[in-house]
Amino acid sequence: MVNLALLVRMEAKPGKEEEVAAFLKGALPLVQAEPATTAWFAIRLTKSTFAIFDAFPNEVGRKAHLSGKVAEALMAKAPDLFVHPPEIEKAAVLASRLPNHQATPMRGEKIPLQVGSELRITNKGELILGNPELELGLFEGAADAVLSYRFDAKSGEHVIRLLEPVAEHRLMGAGRSRE
């Protein structure tokens, strides 16, 4: 759940617009390393006007972000890139809609997998599913297995359960050695 936010407005100096855009795109990995930054958006409003919107569960997270690497880099580059120093506005979030694994971390998600699929789970509980060999994506009917996944952000636990196995039930145990 997000309760607090920041809105940062920036006006690029003439000729620095693409440098600002590249800087903001390059800041994403730094933000991904901040566990309390629940949502972060770098936005281009006009050719020279940019903004950052980010959201946090509490004041501790917002303060951590304001003293983090992105803020440090932004302020260091500000004299070179912007007409005026970035305008940082603190805000309260009245309502939000985020992906389920972020907005409600205890809610389970079904994850259809096919042979060759790759499932990665970040430290924040975000799911990244890659299916390089097949183009059937998340179509559950094409799955070789279906997992249930939930992440408890408070305890940091990832809970994964196999819902539908790869092998048919009659084949289960066929590969086990007999004593």
Image (cartoon, helix red, strand yellow):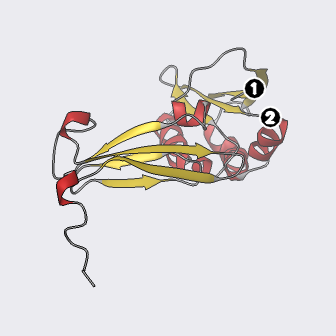
Can residue 118 be seen here? The reply is yes
What residue do we see at 60% from left, 37% from top?
A: 105
How far across and how far down the image is residue 101, in percent?
A: 54, 37
Q: Are marks 2 and 1 in contact (CB under 8 Å)?
A: yes
Q: Quadrant of the C terminus?
A: bottom left
Q: Nearer the viewer, residue 108 or 153?
A: 108
- Mark 2 and mark 1: Cα distance apart in space: 6 Å
The residue sitting at the front extreme is 179
Q: Position of residue 168 (x, y in %)?
A: 19, 52
Q: Does residue 139 appear in this view?
A: no
Residue 48 x %, y %: 53, 26
Q: Which residue shows up at 18% across the image and 55% down it? A: 170
Secondary structure beneath disc 1?
Answer: loop
- Where is residue 56, by image quadrant? top right
Q: Is residue 31 above or below residue 178?
A: above
Q: Earlier in the sequence, mark 2 or mark 1?
A: 1
Q: Is residue 177 left or right of residue 40?
A: left
Q: Secondary structure at mark 2?
A: loop
Q: Amino acid at mark 2?
A: Asn
Return the residue at label 2.
58
Q: Position of residue 79 (x, y in %)?
A: 70, 42
Task: Tell me the crowding category of disc 2: few under 14, some 14 to 19, or many 20 or more residues within 10 angstroms, Cα based.
Answer: some
The answer to whether residue 95 is above or below residue 140 is above
Q: Amino acid at mark 1?
A: Asn
Res 75 → quadrant: top right
* Tag 1 residue: 3
